[in-house]
Image (tube, rainbow, N blue to C red):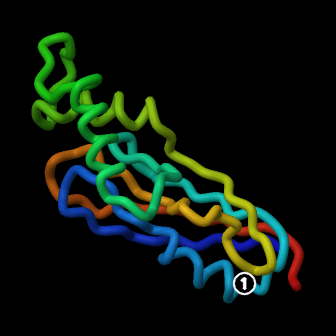
Amino acid sequence: MISQQHLVIPTRGRGLYRIDDQFAPLIRDSGIGIGLCHVFVRHTSASLLICENADPQVGRDLEAFLARLVPDGDPLFGHSDEGPDDMPAHIRAVLTTMDLSLPIVDGRCGLGTWQGVYLYEHRTQAHSRRICVTLSGERS
């Protein structure tokens, strides 16, 4: 069985937004017991990642690291059509990832105890991000 659905995730600007709770019902309602959940963000200035889900400091530390690695307004970058965070947002997305493949185990997303799936908004302004979720597997 294969199914595909789309989610729209609003953001308030740069930061991590936990989204596994948004696609968990899609997995449950599909009836798939074992398979794969593929999640893809349809943008070049946002990404997806699996990260620690218990301590919000982890997200702040990740942001501090990327701010040092790829600072807004760096004169190295010529592409700034949408502002000083434009090219840094593209680089951050390339350095992280725009898709994830997650196991479906016993009808649920097979994440570990301290793992969560996050949309990582790299732009400083609010956006609506489109996520494509494709499920494939065997029904229970």
Q: Residue at x 35, y 28 (%)?
A: 91
Figure quadrant of the N terminus: bottom right
Q: Quadrant of residue 94?
A: top left
Figure quadrant of the C terminus: bottom right
Q: Is residue 73 left or right of residue 65?
A: left
Q: Nearer the viewer, residue 34 or 99?
A: 34
Give the residue furthest to the top: 76
Q: Residue at x 19, y 62 (%)?
A: 12
Q: Is residue 131 left or right of residue 125?
A: right
The residue to which callout 1 is attached is 30
> Picture coordinates of residue 60 (x, y %)?
26, 48
Q: Quadrant of residue 71?
A: top left
Q: Circle 1 — which element?
A: helix
Q: Residue at x 42, y 47 (%)?
A: 47
Q: Is residue 62 above or below residue 35?
A: above
> Picture coordinates of residue 20 (x, y %)?
51, 70
> Picture coordinates of residue 128 (x, y %)?
29, 63
Q: Is residue 57 above or below residue 28?
A: above
Looking at the picture, which amino acid does disc 1 mark?
Ser
Q: Residue at x 39, y 70 (%)?
A: 8
